[in-house]
C-alpha cells in the first residue's frame, strides 16, 4: 500500500512540476519550428480594403459581390470588385502553378471518385438496391467540386459585370 501511495505522489509531482519544467526547457531550445520561415501569403481582404479605402459595410458588399458574382452600382465599389476578383483568380492560378503535382493529383482523385460513384449508382439502379447507395456521402462529396466550379464562375461573372461602366437607369 505504501508503494502505491508513493507512486501516486511521484506521478502528481511529475505532472505538477516536471511537466511544466520540461515544457519550459523544450520551448527554450532552438528546434526546427523556431527556424521555420514565415510564408509570404498576401491577405487579399486587408489589401483590398486598404487599397480602395473601403468602410466595413462597403467591404462586406464588395466581398459578397465577388463571392456571388453580382453587380454593384457605385463606380468605386465596382473597381474594388474587379480588383478583388482578379486577385482571387490569380491566387487560384498561382496555387495550381506552385503545386502542379497536387493539382494533377486532385484532378485524378476527383475523376476516380466520380467514376466509382457513377458505377455504384448504376449498379444500385440496375440491381434495384436503392438502400445500398450512400446518398449523404454522394451529395457531400459532390458539393466540393461543384462549389469550386461555382466559385470560378462567380469570379468570372463579377469581373464581367463590374468591368463595364454603370448602365444608365
Image: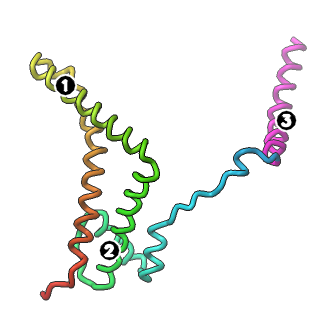
Per the image, the residue denoted by label 1 is 119
Determine whether, in the image, residue 167 is placed left or right of residue 92: left
Q: Which quadrant does the N terminus fall into?
A: top right
Q: CA distance from mark 3 to mark 2?
A: 55 Å
Look at the image and give the residue range highlighted in magenta: 1-28
Residue 88 location, x and y as percent?
38, 63
Q: CA distance from mark 3 to mark 1?
A: 57 Å
Residue 129 location, x and y as percent?
14, 18
**Measured along the vertical axis of the image, is residue 98 above or below residue 10?**
below
Question: Badges 3 and 1: C-beta atoms under 8 Å apart?
Answer: no
* Overall secondary structure of the magenta section: helix
- Which numbered tag is attached to residue 18? 3
Q: Nearer the viewer, residue 117 or 10?
A: 117
**Measured along the vertical axis of the image, is residue 85 above or below residue 137?**
below
In the rendered image, the residue lying farthest to the bottom is 168
Residue 111 location, x and y as percent?
27, 35
Residue at (56%, 61%) from the top-left corner? Answer: 40
* Residue 62 on the magenta span: no
**Measured along the vertical axis of the image, is residue 69 above or below residue 30?**
below
Determine the secondary structure under disc 3.
helix
**Mark sitting earlier along the chain (2/1):** 2
Residue at (85%, 41%) from the top-left corner? Answer: 21
Residue at (25%, 62%) from the top-left corner? Answer: 154
How many residues crowd around disc 2 within 10 Å: few (fewer than 14), some, or many (20 or more)?
A: many
Query: Splitting the image into 4 quarters, where does residue 162 fall?
Result: bottom left
Q: CA distance from mark 2 to mark 1?
A: 42 Å
Determine the secondary structure under disc 2.
helix
Per the image, the residue denoted by label 2 is 81
Query: Splitting the image into 4 quarters, where does residue 16 fall?
Result: top right
Q: Nearer the viewer, mark 3 or mark 2?
A: 2
Residue 80 location, x and y as percent?
35, 77
Determine whether, in the image, residue 150 is placed left or right of residue 17: left
Amino acid at each position: 500500500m505504501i508503494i502505491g501511495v508513493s507512486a501516486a505522489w511521484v506521478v502528481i509531482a511529475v505532472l505538477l512540476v516536471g511537466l511544466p519544467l520540461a515544457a519550459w526547457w523544450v520551448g527554450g531550445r532552438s528546434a526546427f519550428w523556431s527556424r521555420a520561415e514565415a510564408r509570404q501569403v498576401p491577405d487579399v481582404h486587408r489589401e483590398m480594403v486598404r487599397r480602395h479605402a473601403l468602410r466595413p459595410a462597403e467591404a462586406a458588399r464588395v466581398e459578397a459581390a465577388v463571392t456571388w458574382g453580382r453587380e454593384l452600382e457605385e463606380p468605386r465599389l465596382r473597381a474594388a470588385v474587379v480588383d478583388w476578383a482578379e486577385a482571387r483568380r490569380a491566387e487560384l492560378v498561382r496555387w495550381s502553378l506552385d503545386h502542379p503535382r497536387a493539382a494533377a493529383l486532385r484532378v485524378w482523385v476527383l475523376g476516380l471518385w466520380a467514376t466509382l460513384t457513377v458505377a455504384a449508382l448504376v449498379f444500385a439502379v440496375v440491381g434495384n438496391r436503392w438502400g445500398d447507395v450512400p446518398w449523404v456521402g454522394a451529395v457531400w462529396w459532390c458539393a466540393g467540386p461543384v462549389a469550386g466550379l461555382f466559385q470560378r464562375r462567380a469570379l468570372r461573372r463579377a469581373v464581367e459585370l463590374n468591368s463595364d461602366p454603370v448602365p444608365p437607369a
